Image (cartoon, rainbow, N blue to C red):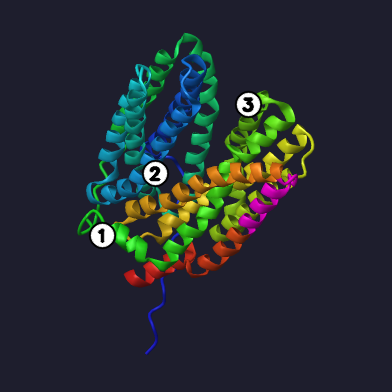
Amino acid sequence: MTAAPVPPPAPPTPFRLSAAQFGLIAVTTLMWGGFFLVIPLVTVHFVDNLGWAAASVGLVLGLRQLTQQGLTVFGGAWADRIGPKPLILAGCLIRTLGFGWMGFASTLPELLAASLLAGIGGGLFDAPKSSAITAVTPPEHRPRMFGLVSIAGNLGMVTGPLLGAWLIALGFQRASLIAASAYIVAFVLLAVTLPRLKPERTPADTFSGLKVALHDRAFRNFTLVLGGYFLLSTQLNVAVTLKAVELAGQGATAPLYGLSAGLSVVLQYPLLRLAERYLRVRVVLVGAVVLVSVALGLMGLAQTFPQLLACVVLYSLGTMLVFPMQQTLTARLAPEGLVGSYFGFSAISLGLGGAVGNFVGGALVDAGHRLHFDLLPWLTLLLVGLATAAGLRVVLRDVPTREEMEARQRQAGA
């Protein structure tokens, strides 16, 4: 008795943006633009203008990030129970209140409360937004869709600081209110374009999806190993910025960030299309981490600011590929009905890697100066990156390709 033949794969559908996909891309630009409009101005206003201690403002911003990343884990799990749309909309409103309140804060407790409110809002919409993107995008188009979302975020990261630098002349209060209004616009846009995505299979309780993610060996290992990459990615804000200022003064930060974000806006989508046409997702991810690692290692040899910027180009080419590949693999590994929980759990790698990276980057630079061995941070980062790439190569062996997943689904439906 012979087995029934497996039906041939259906021809791929053309990639055309739906209203929901367009809305998710547009609100990403609004969210990132609003965030980077006001957050860089917090230090300028409260430290330079009002004379507050830099350490106290830094503590406030750090607690905001910790609050957001911690809540993101649960935001994804809640999305699996009630759907992503209510959480995204609630997050937009709460962040609106948080950013608006910042403009009127006159004491440290007020600023801390406003920042925590903004962090809660971000924690509510981060993972649910990724869950919504997955729900409205067929599997074969997810790398491209996540790439467009990443480009939209980088566009916001470029325009936000430029708007902030212009608006600060009008006063921090007005700037914070305009940043808050970006989330009101995002709320309205998503309320109109995003359908109510009801979960097909509701988890037994809020934490059951997170428990499944925790006990999923392949996904757990993937998440933990990827923390090494996020240790590297934070160095643009730490070691790379310090190197740029050392070579070209404080004015070097604008071209540094502008080059990195601008390259992502212009090149990310065509580079992603090229990579996905010829390479598997996991191969692209491992190669991108290697490229980031090598770029950081070469930065230690840079003697001039143009040489450092050339290294930043390599660094940016790697970073612009990691996000869509990581999101695509997360969506692929997530069981049906637990996509939000998996995206929430994946925030652990960013939270841990980013927190460690901020500390380690500065500590390595200080240690290099003390030991008169300026290559120390860059060699260390290179080794961490290569170890991360090797680890990813091992943990991704058990991850099925998209073709294998589709074949399994066809066999199950036959």
Mark 2 and mark 1 lie on one chain; the one further toward the N terminus is 2
Q: Which residue is denoted by mark 2 in the rendering?
A: 69
**306 or 370, which lies in front?**
370
SS at mark 3 in the image: helix
| Front disc: 2 or 1 | 2
Q: In this view, does 110 lie above or below 364?
A: above
Instruction: Please state which amino acid type lies under the numbered disc 1.
Output: Ser
Q: Horizontal and vertical percent for residue 375?
A: 73, 47
Instruction: Please state which amino acid type lies under the numbered disc 2.
Output: Gln
Mark 3 and mark 1 lie on one chain; the one further toward the N terminus is 1
Gap between marks 3 and 1 measured at Cα: 45 Å
Q: Which residue is denoted by mark 1 in the rendering?
A: 208
Q: Which residue is denoted by mark 3 in the rendering?
A: 254
Furthest residue toward top: 170
**172 or 130, which lies in front?**
172
SS at mark 1 in the image: helix
Looking at the rendered image, the quarter that the N terminus falls into is bottom left
**196 or 4, which lies in front?**
196
Q: Tell me, yes or no, if residue 34 can be seen here.
A: yes
Magenta: main secondary structure equals: helix
Q: Horizontal and vertical percent for residue 46?
A: 46, 20
Q: What segment is highlighted magenta in the picture?
A: 371-386
Residue 101 bears which disc, if any?
none
Furthest residue toward right: 303
